[in-house]
Amino acid sequence: MSRVVTAPGHRASTWTRALESLGAHEPADLLDLGSGDRLVVAVPHPDDETLAVGGTLQRLHIAGVRIVMVLVTAGEASYGDTGEPAAALGRIRIREFHEAMSALGLDGVEVHRLDLPDGMLADHEPAMAQALTEALCVDPIQGGGRVAVLAPWTKDPHPDHRAVGRAAGVAARRAGAVRWSYPVWMRHGLSPADPEIPWPEIRRVALGPTERESKRAAIEIYASQLDGLTPEIGPVLPPYVVEHFTDGHEMLIRPAPGDDEVGVHFEALYEGNADPWQAGPSWYERRKRSVLLASLPSERYRCAWEPGCSLGHLTAELSRRCDRLTASDISPRAIAGARHLVASEHVRIDVAQTPVQPPDLAPGSCDLVVLSEFLYYLPDRTRAATIELAVKLLSPGGHLVTAHWRDHPADAHCSGEQANAEVVAALGSSLVHHLDEHFILDISQKTAAQIDEKA
């Protein structure tokens, strides 16, 4: 009797029903790619690409998208072997990979092999980030066009997948590219009801009959994983696992960082660009700050808090209206810039991740809290906790200011309009409401009744 390497997980049928409730999307529309554009696909192990996005890659290739595969390992450690047995398995899986590419109609696509050690990718994230950055940067000979990266979900149950996803996020920011994610073992390892499932960010790609057949044929090529190496050992991909990948549904996940990677995500923003949002020179940013400051109901404030302060351009202007101001951002590079711009004794600027690292301020001590271009980057539960913290810090009659770009940034968890609406709902009304084609601004006030409710 063979030893089954992968135990049964969650039922494929449960996931199929959950996915069928989602609308279907075209991958080229989601990634905003067309003929001549480039998609760099980060693949931790041979077969991840076929299982997770084999049909999606077929459709993009037919649409004329230039696909570049970055194969990180040879998958040599899938059965726990070392030495020559592992090397031999790696050679088999590389051959299977190329044959599977042909079965998908992707033979001839550009492939970069990194040959990093299977199972140890968390130790090699800088090397992966550098290799992916180089793959994302457009070769002048090849011409321009849009570029995106597709990498594993950073919370996928496999640690190698998480490491590759994190590295891809860094590379995308360095190269100015958009990163989307794909889950591999999520369906097997997690229930659809698990709170870790990022349902608001998931987009379903519905495969057609031809795509499903080609994908099934490509999966069958990975015999080393389907059958095991010997009658006594295997398989990694028993039928109840394969069933998760053959129901005609594939998933892409919007590029919104979770709490565990948000620091790396935003620090990478400033790594190659001192002012990634052009907060200093852009008319949008300068006009928004002017409208915000002119809308404040009070001329002066006793104590204010501004999380997500970035490079401190708004902080500098708020400091002239406040006796005491505490600002923070998760990026050390951003904070260094803010401290250089705002050097006042009554202003404190710290590196902090909100809300898990709250400011050193007592409840009810702030008469002004400013959430500008910040909330929509937080996952749903973190956003709710941040709003709760803001309300808790406000004093009776204090003002809570929320200002965002109206739309939904590619790396955000919701639109600006939704983020503002959640804040207004928390305090019940808005004293000031500004809405134009670019941004939305609300100023709400904490009432005595809300103080009693929190007591």
Image (spheres, helix red, strand yellow):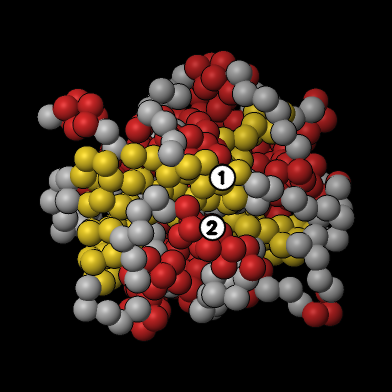
Q: Secondary structure at mark 1?
A: strand
Front residue of 117 and 340: 340
Q: Quadrant of residue 140?
A: bottom right
Find the distance from the CA under tag 2 to the CA under tag 1. Answer: 9 Å
Q: Amino acid at mark 2?
A: Val
Front residue of 280 and 446: 446
Q: Residue at x 81, y 71 (%)?
A: 144
Assess whether mark 1 and mark 2 are in contact (beta carbons under 8 angstroms). Answer: yes
Q: Which residue is mark 1?
A: 434
Question: Which quadrant does the N terminus fall into?
Answer: top left
Q: Is residue 130 above or below residue 95?
A: below
Q: Amino acid at mark 1?
A: His
Residue 291's mark?
Answer: 2
Residue 107 at what x, y percent from top left? 80, 55
Residue 344 at what x, y percent from top left? 27, 79
Q: Residues within 10 Å of mark 1 (few under 14, many from 20)?
A: few
Q: Residue at x 21, y 44 (%)?
A: 395
